Amino acid sequence: MVQRKEKLYLQNALFMLVAHVVGLYGFYVAALGQWRRETLVLGGVMFCVSGLGITVGYHRLFTHRSFKCGEIVQTILAIAGTTAIQNTVKVWVSGHVLHHQKTDKEGDPYNASRGFWYSHIGWILFKDPDRKKGDFSAADHLMEDSWTASLVNFQHEYYIPLAFLFSGLAPALIAWLWGDFWGGLVFAGFSRLILVWHATFCINSIAHWKHWGSRQPYTRANSSQDSWPVSIVTFGEGYHNYHHAFPGDYRNGPYWYNFDPSKWVIFGLSKIGLAKNLNRVPREKIERARSAVLSLE
């Protein structure tokens, strides 16, 4: 592989350093029992909100269009995704589309062939010299619907104040209601945030790491792996080999026993009329893919 010259992304590195220091301090104080119980519950709720905002919103809705929903649900999912502070919808979607187009190759933003730590967090800390700044052409499909376009453009333009409001100030103000403003900011804000980050990063690293069980029942065209432990911390995203084989499916875990809360949320929304056109790969096609992989053994 050609040697790449990359520069440290100082803004990202500093923010992640501060977030980890504050977040780890929050866990330390929690271990001492000094945060209010309500604050600990709020941290758990915020973890679920931000995690599902990424999986259901950023990933399955905005990136892969695996289902459709109305303006209110789109807005709620965009706000929930904002609380995870994983950049704007446009940036996140653009990068993930490139990941599918160029998996394990140059141009894959979190290229697993460059090593575990690069795919886990290094890609965030270092600038990609080949990536054109402000190029979101991989996410052009977001502009096809006027409401979606206006929503993601607004979020993109005002992302920093929105992220501060929903990810930091909101939990702090909620916890202030029971007299724990700093607990809300530190624990439900930063401690929760670093958990969501590393859970999400596991999809790029562990779920593409061949030393982690090498579960590839659907395709061997790339390094993607199925990992149920990763699914537990990512609301179902760990069935990553299936996802790379069938990226448009609203499910990552296609079988009833697969732990995939994100598909349950989407299915639940469809049952109350808030989601429609759920893309579901036929069972016959799934079984053909499994048979084709088995024939390689």
Image (cartoon, rainbow, N blue to C red):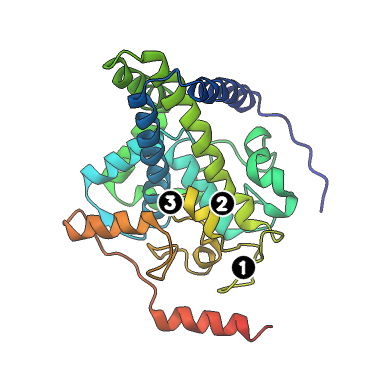
Decide: is 252 above or below 170.
below
Tell me if mark 1 has few (under 14), some (14-19) or many (20+) residues whose alpha carbon lies within 10 angstroms of its own. many
The residue that mark 2 highlights is 203
At x 62%, y 23%, the residue is: 17
Tell me if mark 2 has few (under 14), some (14-19) or many (20+) residues whose alpha carbon lies within 10 angstroms of its own. many
Residue type of the residue flagged with mark 2: Ile
The residue that mark 3 highlights is 235
Decide: is 183 above or below 258.
above
Numbered badge on residue 215: 1
Direction from residue 114 to residue 153 in the image, left or right: left
At x 50%, y 51%, the residue is: 138
Please say if the residues under marks 3 and 2 sit with CB atoms less than 8 Å apart.
no
Q: Secondary structure at mark 3?
A: loop
Residue 180: image location, x then y, percent: 35, 15
Q: Label 3 to label 2, Cα distance in Å? A: 11 Å
Residue 174: image location, x then y, percent: 29, 21
Please say if the residues under marks 2 and 1 sit with CB atoms less than 8 Å apart.
no
At x 52%, y 69%, the residue is: 245
At x 42%, y 49%, the residue is: 55
Tell me if mark 3 has few (under 14), some (14-19) or many (20+) residues whose alpha carbon lies within 10 angstroms of its own. many
